[in-house]
Image (cartoon, grey):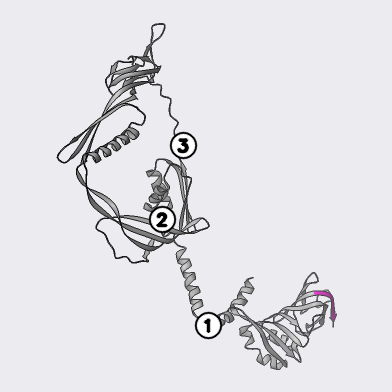
């Protein structure tokens, strides 16, 4: 193998020596330090291999042995290089390609994060980048140990983390901490009202109800007591559990100006495309349009090879013009807006409550409209409040 | 003189089965054919007979024969 490689680098010729005494030629060659290998007899002489350098010196030996030597084929790097000598660009390109390959293999090309469930992958990528492990980072200076320590300190949810760089690929393995099971709280507690209201329904699973249906309750009033009395007239402290429903009045104030500037996207936009490679971006398109007021969107599409996203692709940044349009509101329009807002309030802020009644009034002022809404929601007002027991 | 025999200057022949023979102390090749190779060692002539015989490597005093060797003759 090694010998073959040396012979390839030095270059060899396959020759034929024909004449009166090919054996003498072999002997003369051996005595003069000419190395011949794989020599085989033919009908009129011999064939074999020798190095290019030796072939240049065999003329006198051949003459002495009365044989005529000629080259049948040429092998090895010198001949290969000579063949492509007129095309000098090919070896230069090959050398440049090799140099580029060696240079680019010093950078991190891809980062693969595995094992995360609760922690966001993009957040982890951001933290890794802060610690110097990012796509395009010089891998020999990327301190994976420091990145690991930084992330473990910053993210509580992570229990174990490893950052490994193999070749140009960084692998991050994450093991998240196991969530603590909810502890069974046995501390005695009362149920107290968290809002003013009129009691409509009492479900006391544990403890003694202190209010009756139809009675009013102010915020902070005791609804279900955690202090119970046993049959032997002994005091027993329990953790009161239950639900106390009451009609609760809820007020909401809304305001809508008579005139304001409505900001919307116009049809005008300007896109700029950039070639992104290892974090570096090179503009690919020109756009001289600019807007005073605009929003920007960034869209990336990277080359994907065998399921791995490579750091080579296009980034398109689009700026869309924002236009301010003056809008005036009349009473009818304001009423529609207020109704919509109140409906959203019912659905999203009071989602767990049942609406009993609803009413609103709209007042017009000099600058705008105000809406005063009054709701009655039937909702659970019981709230656990722990108390300490001293012997 | 040792035990009545003088072996100084005798060729050294190393064989691997009958497929390969390495001869040290060769003074020259006298005949090279695919069925017969004749080597001179100064004091005697060694003839290798067989099929597909080839000289794999030839250097100053060393010859490597490769092929199916069926017979070796020594002529003094």
- Discs 3, 2: same chain: yes
Instruction: Give me the disc on residue A134.
Output: 2
- Please state the horizontal and vertical placement of residue A77, each as a whole percent of the image: 58, 78
The residue that mark 1 highlights is A85
Q: Secondary structure at mark 3?
A: loop
Q: Quadrant of residue A41?
A: bottom right
Q: How crowded is the residue under tag 3: few (<14 C-alpha within 10 Å), some, or many (20+)?
A: few
Q: Quadrant of residue A50?
A: bottom right
Pick the residue in front: A248 or B15: A248
The residue that mark 3 highlights is A178
- Discs 1, 3: same chain: yes
Q: Single out the residue that lies furthest toward the top.
A: A232
Q: CA distance from mark 3 to mark 2?
A: 28 Å
Q: Which residues are magenta?
A: B68-76
Label 2 resides on the chain identified as: A
Mark found first going from the N terminus, 1 or 2: 1
Residue appearing at x 59%, y 77% in the figure = A9
- Please state the horizontal and vertical placement of residue B52, each as a whole percent of the image: 79, 77
Q: Is residue B69 magenta?
A: yes
Label 1 resides on the chain identified as: A
Can residue A53 be seen here? The reply is yes
Main SS category, magenta section = strand
Residue appearing at x 28%, y 17% in the figure = A216
Say whether residue A316 is left or right of residue A367: right
Pick the residue in front: A37 or A203: A203
Mark found first going from the N terminus, 3 or 2: 2
Q: Split into 4 quadrants, where in the image is the C terminus of chain A?
A: top left
A218 to A364, vertically: above or below? above
Q: Is residue A277 magenta?
A: no
A334 to A91, vertically: above or below? above
């Amino acid at each position: 193998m090694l010998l073959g490689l040396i012979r390839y680098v030095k270059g060899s010729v396959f020759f034929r020596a024909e004449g009166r005494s090919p054996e003498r030629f072999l002997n003369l060659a051996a005595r003069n330090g000419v190395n011949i290998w794989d020599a085989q007899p033919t009908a009129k002489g011999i064939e074999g291999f020798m190095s290019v350098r030796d072939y240049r010196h065999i003329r006198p030996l051949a003459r002495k042995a009365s044989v005529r030597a000629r080259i049948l084929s040429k092998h090895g790097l010198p001949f290969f290089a000579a063949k492509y000598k007129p095309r000098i660009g090919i070896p230069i390109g090959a050398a440049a390609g090799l140099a580029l390959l060696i240079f680019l293999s010093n950078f991190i090309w891809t980062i693969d994060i595995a094992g995360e469930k609760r922690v966001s992958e993009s957040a982890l990528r951001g933290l890794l980048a802060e610690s110097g492990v990012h796509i395009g980072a010089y891998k020999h200076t990327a301190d994976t140990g420091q990145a690991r320590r930084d992330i473990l300190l910053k993210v509580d949810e992570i229990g174990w983390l490893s950052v490994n760089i193999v070749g140009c690929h960084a692998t991050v393995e994450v093991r998240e901490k196991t969530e603590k099971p909810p502890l069974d709280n046995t501390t005695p507690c009362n149920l107290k009202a968290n809002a003013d209201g009129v009691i409509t329904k009492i479900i006391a699973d544990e403890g003694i109800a202190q209010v009756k249906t139809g009675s009013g309750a102010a915020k902070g009033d005791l609804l279900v007591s955690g202090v119970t009395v046993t049959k032997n007239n002994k005091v027993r402290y329990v953790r009161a559990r239950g639900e106390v429903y009451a009609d609760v009045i809820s007020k909401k104030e809304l305001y809508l100006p008579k005139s304001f500037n409505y900001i919307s996207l116009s049809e005008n936009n300007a896109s700029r495309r950039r070639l992104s490679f290892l974090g570096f971006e090179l503009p690919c398109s020109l756009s001289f349009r600019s807007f005073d007021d605009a929003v920007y969107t960034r869209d990336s599409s990277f080359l994907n090879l065998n399921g791995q996203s490579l750091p080579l692709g296009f980034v398109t940044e689009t700026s869309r013009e924002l236009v301010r349009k003056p809008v005036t509101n009349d009473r009818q329009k304001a009423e529609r807006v207020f109704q919509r807002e109140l409906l959203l309030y019912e659905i999203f802020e009071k989602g767990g409550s049942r609406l009993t009644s609803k009413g609103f009034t709209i007042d017009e002022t000099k600058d705008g409209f105000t809406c005063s809404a009054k709701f009655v929601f039937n909702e659970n007002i019981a709230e656990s409040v722990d108390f300490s027991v001293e012997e | 003189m040792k035990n009545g025999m003088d072996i100084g200057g005798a060729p050294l022949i190393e064989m691997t089965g009958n497929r390969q023979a390495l001869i040290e102390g060769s003074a020259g090749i006298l005949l090279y054919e695919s069925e017969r190779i004749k080597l001179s060692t100064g004091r005697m002539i060694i003839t290798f007979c067989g099929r597909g015989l080839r000289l794999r490597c030839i250097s100053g005093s060393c010859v490597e024969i490769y092929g199916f060797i069926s017979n070796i003759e020594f002529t003094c």
